[in-house]
């Protein structure tokens, strides 16, 4: 009787078991990296908007931060921000580019951002925790 070449059931089970173990080790690291990337994206967006606010302050003759409504701020900062739309806060259930004008920087979670036109402070309008489990998005 001729012997057929191929894999036995035991060999296939061992290979599947090894692949399952590798996936169980790698999956949490990949998922964690995605969360860290989202946090990094929010931090980069904040940095870009804060830089735009400083550029506005130095290039406008009045020398102050932009004033007005959320729409006014969007319009005034548009020349200083790359892209066609104002960036959205995509964290803590937020997906909005609306700006809450508030000198106390009170986080209410109704708009995407909170802005103090007197000081130029600009934060995320969310008390949700970042990936580190300690820092709030509003503290970035």
Image (cartoon, rainbow, N blue to C red):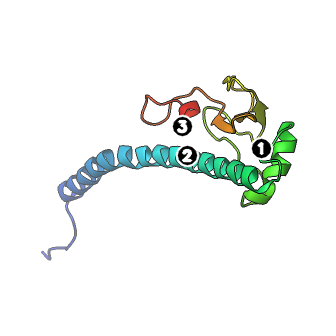
| Mark 2 neighbour class, 10 Å CA radius: few under 14, some 14 to 19, many 20 or more | some
Query: Any mark on residue 43, and which?
Result: 2
Q: What element carries label 3?
A: loop
Quadrant occupied by the C terminus: top right
Asked if the residue under mark 3 is in contact with the one under mark 2, i.e. CB atoms within 8 Å, the reply is yes
Query: Any mark on residue 105, and which?
Result: none
Query: Any mark on residue 64, and which?
Result: 1
Q: Where is residue 31 in the image (x, y as percent from the top left)?
A: 43, 45
Vertical comparison of 4 with 44: above or below:
below
Vertical comparison of 5 with 78: above or below:
below
Q: Position of residue 87 (x, y in %)?
A: 71, 49
Nearer to us in this view, 16 or 74:
74
Nearer to us in this view, 91 or 73:
73
Vertical comparison of 13 with 125: above or below:
below
What residue is at 64 percent from the left and 36 percent from the top? 123
What residue is at 72 percent from the left and 61 percent from the top? 82
User: Residue 1 occupies which quadrant of the picture?
Assistant: bottom left
Residue 10 placement, left or right of 45: left
Residue 52 placement, left or right of 68: left
Q: Position of residue 73 (x, y in %)?
A: 82, 44
Instruction: Give the CA distance from mark 2 to mark 1.
Output: 24 Å
Q: Mark 3 points at which residue?
A: 140
């Amino acid at each position: 009787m001729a012997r057929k070449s191929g894999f036995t059931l035991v060999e296939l089970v061992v290979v599947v078991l090894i692949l399952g173990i590798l996936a169980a080790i790698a999956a949490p690291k990949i998922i964690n990296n995605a969360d860290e990337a989202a946090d990094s994206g929010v931090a980069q967006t904040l940095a870009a908007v804060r830089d735009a606010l400083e550029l506005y302050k130095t290039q406008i003759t009045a020398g102050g931060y932009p004033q007005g409504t959320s729409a006014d701020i969007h319009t005034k900062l548009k020349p200083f921000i790359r892209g066609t739309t104002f960036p959205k806060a995509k964290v803590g259930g937020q997906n909005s580019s609306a700006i809450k004008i508030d000198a106390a920087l009170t986080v209410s979670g109704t708009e995407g951002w909170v802005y103090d036109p007197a000081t130029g402070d600009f934060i995320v309008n969310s008390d949700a925790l970042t990936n580190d489990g300690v820092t709030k998005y509003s503290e970035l």
